[in-house]
Image (cartoon, helix red, strand yellow):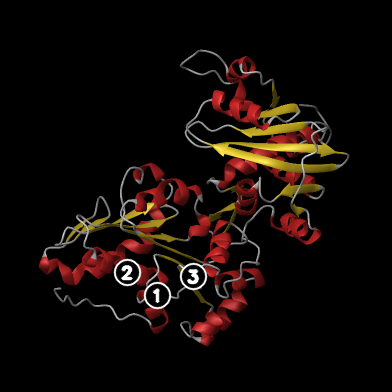
């Protein structure tokens, strides 16, 4: 094998990672530990050493813009010594082509269609806690299967979500390489800098970002406190379905993205979230089939206001289509989004969630958070629109339709100080 020298001296802490023999790896590391640089060089090494025809490797971050900002400069720097051998840089496609036919490309999880249908020999999923977990199961994992490609999940904790579940399962699996780097133990960040960070961050922020705590609340998360109380009270776990009690459904309608449905039983003041379904790219007929197969005793079906919209292809409203499938929609009028979030918060204090059947919906509630303003360095009032929005918006539809029909909205309170009706 030809010997190629590159300008990379791995940090001592990452040598076990580079020397791993397992196909899959999960790295939980504090900020500025150097995990992205290590992974970029691991991708490049893979592209140079892979003996498959036309090796293909990928780095994926939650957003393409983020991937370009975080990793592209590192990748261009890594390939620099190899350009004399014929390696080329494609700026427009964020792609490196090596002299042996290998390739490394930068992607964003916000455009999963760009990854569908490709094959991969290795992949890095950076900040996996911010990604839709289905990207791995439905898109990336199949891309690795025929060539037995490897995968590395890296990131900093953001609560008990899919990354947390992956980390826990990986630790218990000998076929996975795992590594945890806390700032207090890694010696990668000077102590004086850690003192500054502790002074300028909240306890939860520091615990999450530098001590890799999965138990710290997700910064900006709308329902962090409510879900923490539910965990402490034992209200997230096994919730049996009472087949004598009606099951209400609450929907968020996707056009180009996901449609989410919560299945909810109301017993006295208790709200029991007993089931959850989410899918994309299918019509109402498929969702009607799902409802029928579950064989629940249905009550009301709560839909957001856009259910009244007409479909261009048929000229029929969505309401008409649903009625034709045996689903009678209850339209929930559009009101202030923060009113809906507050309604969900109130409801969660008397709510139980089935941890298994509602796993994806629960992840969505945990991850639903405010958008961060990089310029002002503060949280915006409006929510961040990502994969978690669908499940959170569906539950907001229920809270506004079932729980809050007589409660005045913020806008109405501001305009008159009294209840004006919907």
Percent coordinates x, y for residue 331 in the rendering: 69, 25
Question: Spatial distance from mark 2 to mark 1, Cα to Cα?
Answer: 9 Å
Q: Residues within 10 Å of mark 3 (few under 14, many from 20)?
A: few
Q: Residue at x 80, y 38 (%)?
A: 242
| Residue identified by numbered label 1 | 17
Distance from Cα at disc 3 to Cα at disc 1 = 15 Å
Q: Residues within 10 Å of mark 2 (few under 14, many from 20)?
A: some
Label for residue 132? none
Asked whether the residues under the numbered discs 2 and 1 touch, taking CB atoms below 8 Å apart as contact, a structural biologist would say yes
* Quadrant where the image shows the N terminus: bottom left
Determine the image quadrant of residue 418.
top right
Q: Going 34% across and 44% down the picture, which residue do you hit?
A: 114
Which residue is drawn at the image coordinates 56% and 63% (left, top)?
A: 169
Mark closer to the chain start, 3 or 1: 1
In-image side of 153 versus 161 (left or right) = left
- Name the residue carrying label 2: 42
Q: Does residue 323 appear anywhere in the picture?
A: yes
Q: Position of residue 251 (x, y in %)?
A: 64, 33
- Mark 1 surroundings: few (<14), some (14-19) or many (≥20) residues within 10 A: many
Cα gap from disc 3 to disc 2, whole angstroms: 21 Å
Quick one: label 3 or label 2, which is nearer the N terminus? Answer: 2
Q: Nearer the viewer, mark 3 or mark 2?
A: 3
Contact, mark 3 vs mark 1 (Cβ under 8 Å): no
Q: Which residue is mark 3?
A: 174
Q: Label 1, secondary structure: give it.
A: helix
Where disc 2 sits, the SS reads helix
Instruction: Give whichever of 27, 415 is nearer the camera.
Output: 27
In this rendering, would 298 be left or right of 5?
right
- The quarter of the picture where the C terminus appears is top right
Give the answer, above or below, for where 127 lies relative to 15: above
Residue 411 appears in the picture as rendered: no
């Amino acid at each position: 094998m030809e010997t190629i020298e590159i300008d990379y001296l791995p940090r001592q802490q990452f040598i076990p990672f580079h020397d791993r023999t397992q196909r899959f790896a999960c790295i939980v590391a504090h900020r500025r530990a150097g995990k992205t640089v290590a992974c970029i060089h691991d991708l490049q090494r893979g592209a140079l050493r892979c003996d498959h025809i036309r090796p293909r490797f990928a780095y994926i971050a939650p957003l393409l813009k983020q991937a370009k900002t975080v990793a592209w400069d590192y990748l261009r720097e890594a390939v620099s010594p190899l350009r004399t051998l014929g390696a080329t840089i494609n700026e427009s496609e964020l792609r490196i082509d090596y002299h042996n036919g290998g390739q490394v490309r930068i992607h964003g999880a916000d455009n999963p269609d760009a990854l569908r249908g490709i094959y991969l020999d290795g992949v890095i999923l950076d900040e996996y806690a911010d990604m839709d977990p289905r990207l791995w199961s439905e898109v990336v994992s199949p891309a690795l299967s025929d060539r037995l490609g490897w995968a590395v999940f890296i990131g900093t904790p953001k609560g008990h979500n899919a990354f947390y579940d992956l980390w826990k399962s990986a630790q218990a699996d000998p076929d996975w390489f795992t590594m945890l780097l806390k700032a207090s133990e890694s010696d990668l960040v000077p102590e004086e800098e850690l003192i500054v960070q502790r002074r300028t961050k909240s306890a939860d922020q520091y615990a999450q970002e530098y001590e890799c705590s999965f138990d710290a609340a997700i910064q900006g998360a709308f329902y962090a406190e409510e879900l923490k109380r539910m965990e402490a009270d034992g209200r997230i776990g096994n919730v049996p379905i009472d087949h004598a009690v009606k099951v209400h459904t609450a929907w968020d309608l996707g056009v180009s993205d996901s449609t989410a449905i919560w299945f909810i039983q109301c017993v006295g003041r208790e709200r029991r979230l007993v089931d959850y379904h989410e899918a994309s790219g299918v019509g109402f007929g498929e969702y009607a089939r799902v409802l029928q197969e579950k064989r629940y005793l249905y009550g009301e079906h709560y839909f957001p206001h856009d259910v009244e919209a007409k479909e261009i292809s048929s000229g029929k409203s969505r309401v008409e289509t649903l009625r034709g499938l045996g689903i009678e929609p209850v339209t929930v009028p559009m009101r202030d989004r923060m009113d809906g979030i507050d309604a969900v918060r109130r409801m969660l204090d008397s709510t139980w969630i089935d941890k298994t059947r509602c796993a994806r919906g629960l992840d969505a509630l945990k991850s639903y958070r405010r958008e961060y303003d990089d310029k002002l360095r503060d949280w915006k009032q409006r929510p961040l629109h990502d994969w978690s929005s669908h499940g959170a918006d569906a539950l907001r539809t229920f809270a506004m339709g079932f729980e809050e029909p007589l409660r005045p909205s913020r806008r109405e309170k501001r305009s008159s100080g009294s209840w004006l009706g919907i």
